[in-house]
Amino acid sequence: MRLLIVGNGGRASALALKLSEDSKITKMFFAPGNATTEKLGENINETDILALRDFAIKNKVDLTIVGPEAPLVEGIVDEFKKVDLKVFGPTKKAASLEGSKSFSKKFMQTYGIKTAKAVIFDSYVEAKEYLQTQEFPIVIKASGLAGGKGVVIAEDLEEAEGTIHDFMIKRIFGDAGIQVVIEEFLQGFEASIIGVSNGEKIFPFVSAKDYKKAGNGDKGPNTGGMGSVAPSPEFTDAHNQDFIQNIMNPTVEGLKKEGLNFKGFIFFGLMITKNGTYLLEYNMRLGDPETQVLLPLLENNLVDVIEDCLNGKELDLKFKDKKAVCLVVCSGGYPKNHETGYEITGVEKVKNSKVLYAGADYRGSRVVSTGGRVLNIVALGDTYDEARKKVYEDAVPVQFDYAFYRDDIAKF
């Protein structure tokens, strides 16, 4: 088989590593890829959807897996299907469940999916007036794609008004903030469930825990994710049953009724409160950095899982009885202004973990940083402490200028 994987972050590296175990795969292309994928396949400097379609035709690609949200929202799956290319992911219409938070919130409300109370605003003036009547903290979301950074928990009226001004007037996320969703703040802990859809059913993976804030103790600004753990130690069987009954099953029914059936990954961002499990958001793809801890635990062959989904078959997913920990190493200043181009050294000294490059590419024989989240260090263990110890010990020799990471990933 010849595969095309669209993406270039740590998620693409995790996919590459998992797929490299499969003897059926003779060639992997990555668009645009990174320093890890370059060693496991061929990186191509292409992101345009039509160019990728033409590349897949010319290079006789048997299957395309789409990692990031932007090409899905732009309709890459629809374009590939028009020319009978096999592709795993939601259609443009189904991807709106991630691409538009207002669309997804209306979907949740329509189909009785357990979620926070929310109001959608197109008008800055009306949003500002609404805030005058609310209790704080309150959650404000840019409706469109904002790289995982378009959600603010406003602690008071001043911060809330400043946030909607940034989103709707200053347009710090461009058109993504033209429309905002203002919703009640739910107190509890977050968990992530990623599943695969065969067009009729969703088959969930084990749970994961993502660390979104830049600083220890969940302090500082939101990021794309500073680390992850699977399974989530806080997410119980009772929470899972609540999720299946009140979120996953009504989602499946809603997808059918709206004609949004698709074959691909779906991500449920959950908040678990004293009143049960609530849905915060959908992502219509694998999460990052959740993928980095889920795929090493998955015992099934990933291509077989995808092919069975594409053929509408039932799945029997199996996972190792292990704990997985991922530490994200970032460039100083992330998630705000940060510099790139720093050489990464010491990776050859890593003993008990896997190093997955994210924002990093080869420059000749050197690997240099190209993004905010530079690399991931991933390990398995029989306990969280064992996996955590491996990750943090292996982080010590890996160095580049202004590198930083959280010290409290998987510290329970």
Image: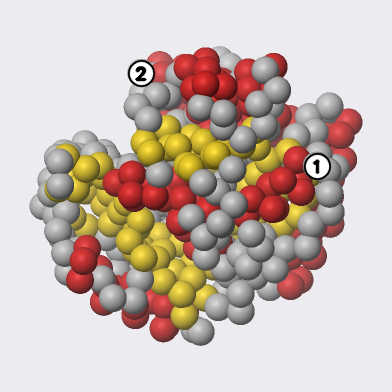
> Where residue 284 sits in the image (x, y, percent)?
63, 38
Q: Quadrant location of the C terminus?
A: bottom left
| Residue 335 % position (x, y) | 30, 42
Residue 159 appears in the picture as rendered: no
Instruction: Indicate whether 84 appears above or below 267.
Output: above
Q: Residue at x 64, y 50 (%)?
A: 303
Question: Where is mark 1, residue-wise?
Answer: 311
The crowd level at tag 1 (other Cα within 10 Å; few <14, some 14-19, many 20+) is few
Q: Residue at x 88, y 31 (%)?
A: 257
Q: Quadrant of the N terminus?
A: top right
Instruction: Give, as a three-letter code, the residue at label 1.
Output: Asn
Q: Is residue 313 visible?
A: yes
Q: Earlier in the sequence, mark 2 or mark 1?
A: 2
Q: Residue at x 35, y 71 (%)?
A: 353
**Residue underneath mark 2:** 170
Is disc 2 surrounded by few (<14), some (14 to 19) or many (20+) residues within 10 Å?
few
Q: Are marks 2 and 1 in contact (CB under 8 Å)?
A: no
What SS does tag 1 mark?
A: loop
What label does residue 94 carry, if any? none
| Front residue of 217 and 192 | 192
Pick whichever, 45 or 387, lies toward us.
45
| Residue closer to the observer: 28 or 251 | 28
- Residue lying at 15% horizontally and 41% vertically, measured from the top left: 364
Q: Residue 116, position in %: x, y? A: 68, 45
SS under mark 2: loop
Whole-angstrom CA distance, mark 2 to mark 1, is 46 Å
Q: How many marks?
A: 2
Question: Which kind of residue does numbered mark 2 sit on?
Answer: Lys
**Camera-side mark, 2 or 1:** 1
Residue 213 spot, x, y in % from top left:
38, 53
